[in-house]
Amino acid sequence: MMTLRVETVPPAVFAVLDAGPQRAALNGEVPSVSVVLDNARGEAAARFAVPPLRARAVLLIDDVAVFTGSVQAVTLAEVATLALEG
């Protein structure tokens, strides 16, 4: 199971629908990943009405951290998409 923990006050944990591949260029670009959360009931929209930009976020698979970074952008629609950078 994939989850995203966003270090807000209080911390928020969300089930992840999909996570894009981790990206980094050879020229030293910062690693990044996009994470898609369910927003069918508006939970993500309510939680991210004021986006937690620069908040620490940890992407976990079966409780093992696979990416740690900060929230750089939030897009809200039928799903919520968070852009994370390492």
Image (cartoon, helix red, strand yellow):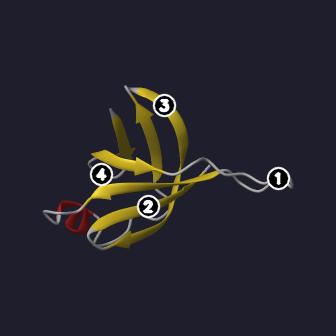
First of labels 2, 3 by sequence position? 3
The residue sitting at 54% across, 41% down in the picture is 68
The three-letter amino acid code for the residue at tag 1 is Gly
First of labels 2, 1 by sequence position? 1
First of labels 4, 2 by sequence position? 4
Mark 2 neighbour class, 10 Å CA radius: few under 14, some 14 to 19, many 20 or more: many
First of labels 3, 1 by sequence position? 1
The three-letter amino acid code for the residue at tag 3 is Ala
The three-letter amino acid code for the residue at tag 4 is Val
Could you tell me how far apart the alpha carbons at marks 4 and 2 are, in whole angstroms? 18 Å
The residue sitting at 46% across, 65% down in the picture is 53
**The image quarter in which residue 59 lies:** top left
- Judged from the image, the secondary structure of the residue bearing numbered disc 4 is loop
Residue assigned mark 4: 9
**The image quarter in which residue 27 lies:** bottom right
First of labels 4, 1 by sequence position? 4
- Judged from the image, the secondary structure of the residue bearing numbered disc 2 is strand
Residue assigned mark 3: 65
Residue 45: where, in percent of width, then height?
24, 68
Which disc number belongs to residue 82? 2
